Image (cartoon, rainbow, N blue to C red):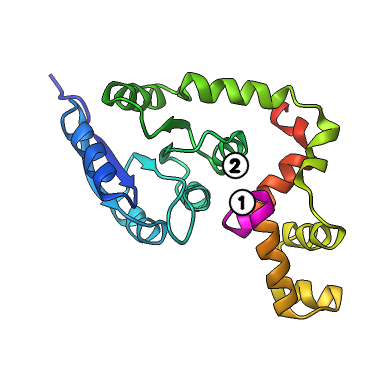
Amino acid sequence: MTAPETLAIAIVEDNAALGASLRKIIEASDGMDCIGVWTSGEDALKKIDAFRPQLVLMDINLPGISGIETTARVKQHLPEIQIIMVTVYRDHDKIFAALKAGASGYLLKRSSPGEVRDAIHDVRAGGAPMSPEIARRVVEAFHQPAETQTEELNLTPRETEILELLCEGLANKEIADRLGISNETVRVHLKHIYEKLHVRSRTEAAMKYRDARNPDRWMR
């Protein structure tokens, strides 16, 4: 009789204690093997291609490249890898960004060992696990009036203009040239945009702005 395949799992988590806790849960579970714990998105992107885990537990709030952006890059090049976000955040904007980036599930960091194991099994079976309170927030977000979503971003006309050019893929210098302003002015505007949108990267800012402009696209 053929032995069941062992599931190769990697962890991307900058909190050493949580990373060790997740490793312990995985290594104590039948049919699962932790092949690495990496503390940043940059490190993960270097090692995931070499180690090729089948599933990754990914923190959102990583230093440097965010977990959302790391997920998007992994899924672009290795779409077969399944990713579950493990985070303290309960903000539905981050949920949407994580799902859009390619995450297969979403768990809070306070999830029990049993919930972590169940989520891994669910993803391998084709499911998309989320804690009940996260699922509720997703449903509530669909019920928001579409016309209010872009207004709630509270961006100035110039910030909106810069964000639209960012969504087109323009670099800071290209945005500056297009608008006739300096690179430093663009940088300052982007800093304010990130603060208002509660994001940490160009990718997350573009995702959030597109979601606000096109709330119905999640239903397509």
All told, the count of numbered labels is 2
* Residue drawn at (48%, 43%) of the image: 79
| Dot 2 amino acid type | Ala
**SS of the residue under disc 1:** helix
Q: Residues within 10 Å of mark 1 (few under 14, many from 20)?
A: many
The percent coordinates of residue 153 (x first, y second) are 76, 46
Report the front residue among 46 and 107: 107
Pointer 1 or 2: first along the chain: 2
Indicate left or right for 166 with 112 as reference.
right
Q: Is residue 171 visible?
A: no
Is residue 51 on the magenta stretch? no
Range of the magenta residues? 195-203
Q: Quadrant of residue 159?
A: bottom right
* Figure check: 49 above or below 189: above
Q: Residue at left 23%, top 38%?
A: 21
Identify whether 39 is placed above or below 101. below
The quadrant of the rendering that contains the N terminus is top left
Please state which amino acid type lies under the numbered disc 1: Glu
In the image, residue 168 above or below residue 145: below
Residue 197: say if magenta.
Answer: yes
Mark 1 lies on residue: 204
Tell me what residue is drawn at x 42 percent, y 32 percent: 108
Q: Position of residue 100 (x, y in %)?
A: 60, 40
| Residue to which mark 2 is pinned | 97
CB under 8 Å between discs 1 and 2: yes
